[in-house]
Image (cartoon, coloured by chain):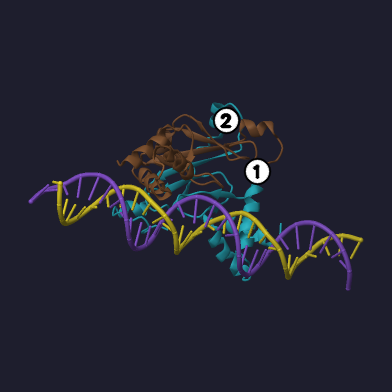
Chain colours: A brown, B cyan, C yellow, D purple
Amino acid sequence: MTKYEKQIYEIVNFSGSHLTAEQVFMELKNTYPSVSLATVYNNLNKLCETGKIRRVLVEGSPDRYDRIARHDHLVCQRCGRLADVQFADLTASLRQQLGEDFFSYDLKVFYLCPDCRKNEIIHKKGGCE
Amino acid sequence: MTKYEKQIYEIVNFSGSHLTAEQVFMELKNTYPSVSLATVYNNLNKLCETGKIRRVLVEGSPDRYDRIARHDHLVCQRCGRLADVQFADLTASLRQQLGEDFFSYDLKVFYLCPDCRKNEIIHKKGGCE
DNA sequence: TCTCTTTTTTAGAATTATTCTAATTCCATT
DNA sequence: AATGGAATTAGAATAATTCTAAAAAAGAGA
């Protein structure tokens, strides 16, 4: 692991949120002010390929990166904001239903986040993150 | 519903696969040879917003469009191919665990598709669709 | 330490999917 | 036939990501 790879891993893993490449880039600049965005993309890709972090796809927003530890996501239907949630682990059940092994699964639940529930006004990209 | 909207809906709904905007465009041209790609995007977006079809996000591939009827997806870890699968409906369980209502959920299971299982050779974009 | 080789990083161009814009066409209603 | 509003259109614009080829850094012997 190079210093960049390591630091990017730390940023993604301990951020507590779901950072975009751009956000990781900004963070990384605190430590390495002259790093380039290409390096961030290179390393995020490498970290995903080696299974050290995971990519989270959300409609209408750039890819996000997340720690690997098992958890699921709530996605706000209105503003797109992501929140972590821990539903019961489905691995055993899915495996049994599928009748064969698999690598992992991704579960997203679409809801209305607390902020958007308050403002029942229509706004595509208002209040929420 | 305009003729385009209707036809696009039919194409997505009855294709039996998970078409990209480009593929829908190609299909639509059979019926309306002079239609434009912008119309396809416009209508796919409208159909998604009104909940008549759904968008399926897959890593490294353009957005795909799918019928709304409840089902889940298998995603090949190696080639990215999508397959339909019907796991037990999680709605009640998730609702109970979450303690509140939600709109829908999206479950993807990452596995190795039959084709890729055969060719255990490394190929990012080989054999599969 | 000095070279040689490999890996990583870099800047910027290129690519690609999608959205935007503003003009035009289409259709329903008067 | 004239009007108004929605749908369609072509093509420009945007934005995220990948690619490219060169430069820098890191290792690995001698």
Say what amino acid the circle numbered 1 marks.
Lys
Check disc 2 and report its element: helix, strand or loop.
Answer: helix
Instruction: Pinpoint residue B52: horizontal percent, then vertical percent.
Output: 64, 49
Res. A88 in view = yes
Specify the quadrant that holds the N terminus of chain B: bottom right
User: Of B112 and A86, which appears nearest the observer?
Assistant: A86
Q: Which residue is mark 2?
A: B95
Residue A5 percent location from the top left of the image: 34, 41
Q: Is residue B76 left or right of residue B41?
A: left
- Residue pictured at 35% horizontal, 42% vertical: A4
Left or right, residue A54 beside residue A82:
left
Q: Residues within 10 Å of mark 2 (few under 14, many from 20)?
A: few
Q: Is residue B31 above or below residue D25?
A: below
- For this view, does D24 lie left or right of residue D7? left
Is residue A97 in view from this perspective? no
- The image shows a total of numbered marks equal to 2
Residue that mark 1 sits on? A124
Q: Nearer the viewer, mark 2 or mark 1?
A: 1
In percent of width and height, residue A105 lies at: 43, 40
- Closer-to-camera residue (D28/A29): A29
Question: Which type of secondary structure does the marked residue at label 1 adopt?
Answer: loop
Which amino acid, by three-letter code, is at mark 2?
Arg
Callout 2: chain: B
Q: Which mark is residue B60?
A: none
Q: Chain of mark 1?
A: A
